[in-house]
Amino acid sequence: MAARKARVADVHEVAAGMPHVTKWERDDGTDRPVYQVGGKSFVFFRTPRPDAVDPLTGEKYDDVIMIWVESESEKLALLADDTTPFFTTPHFDGHPSILIRARDLSALTKQELTELIQDAWLSRASPRRATTWLHENRLS
């Protein structure tokens, strides 16, 4: 049986399902939430910005999701893998995060996306919360 492809709904489900998460909604009526743990963002849906545009039309991407990673080396490894849909922009140089367009999530399996979001949460959670979660999920 083939692994199910990731969807936008999976981003919301996994991010919101991690412990101690708050979901911050924008006041502008758009569905671009920010998921935080301990007041630190780990996944958020960006508003269209001039640093992420379609190279053919110049239109700003309106579906970019930013996901934190543990380190710059992890970011570079993800970006170096041509089989993944991840990208970055100069705005995020030196920032431990990767970008992905919502339309490209199907290039990942739900399991791959889940692990990516769990790792993002772990990179931003307090050591106590991270250790507890790893222990409860038999990952440590």
Image (spheres, grey):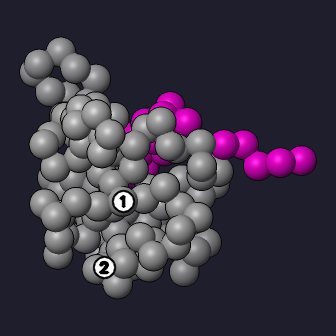
Q: Nearer the viewer, residue 131 or 40?
A: 40
Q: Which of the two labelled residues, at mark 1 and mark 2, occupies the earlier sequence position?
A: 2
Q: Which mark is residue 121?
A: none
Q: Nearer the viewer, residue 111 or 82?
A: 82
For residue 40, above or below residue 4: below
Q: Which residues are magenta?
A: 1-22
| Residue underneath mark 2 | 71
> Can the viewer see residue 108 in this picture?
yes
Q: Residue at x 49, y 55 (%)?
A: 85
Kind of residue sitting beneath label 1: Phe
Left or right: 11 in relation to 111: left
Left or right: 1 in relation to 137: right
> What percent of the width, then of the height, locates residue 62?
28, 31
> What percent of the width, then of the height, locates residue 68?
30, 62
Left or right: 140 in relation to 63: right
Q: Residue at x 35, y 84 (%)?
A: 73
Of circles 1 and 2, which is in front? Answer: 1
Q: Nearer the viewer, residue 122 or 63?
A: 63
For residue 65, above or below residue 103: below
Asked if residue 15 is among those painted magenta in the image, a careful observer would answer yes
> What percent of the width, then of the height, locates residue 105?
52, 44
Q: Nearer the viewer, residue 88 or 36?
A: 88
- Crowding near pointer 1: few (<14 within 10 Å), some, many (20+)? some
Instruction: Say which element carries label 2.
Output: loop
Number of marks present in the image shown: 2
> Can the viewer see residue 21 in this picture?
no
Q: Residue at x 66, y 43 (%)?
A: 5
**Quarter of the image that includes the C terminus:** bottom right
| Residue underneath mark 1 | 87
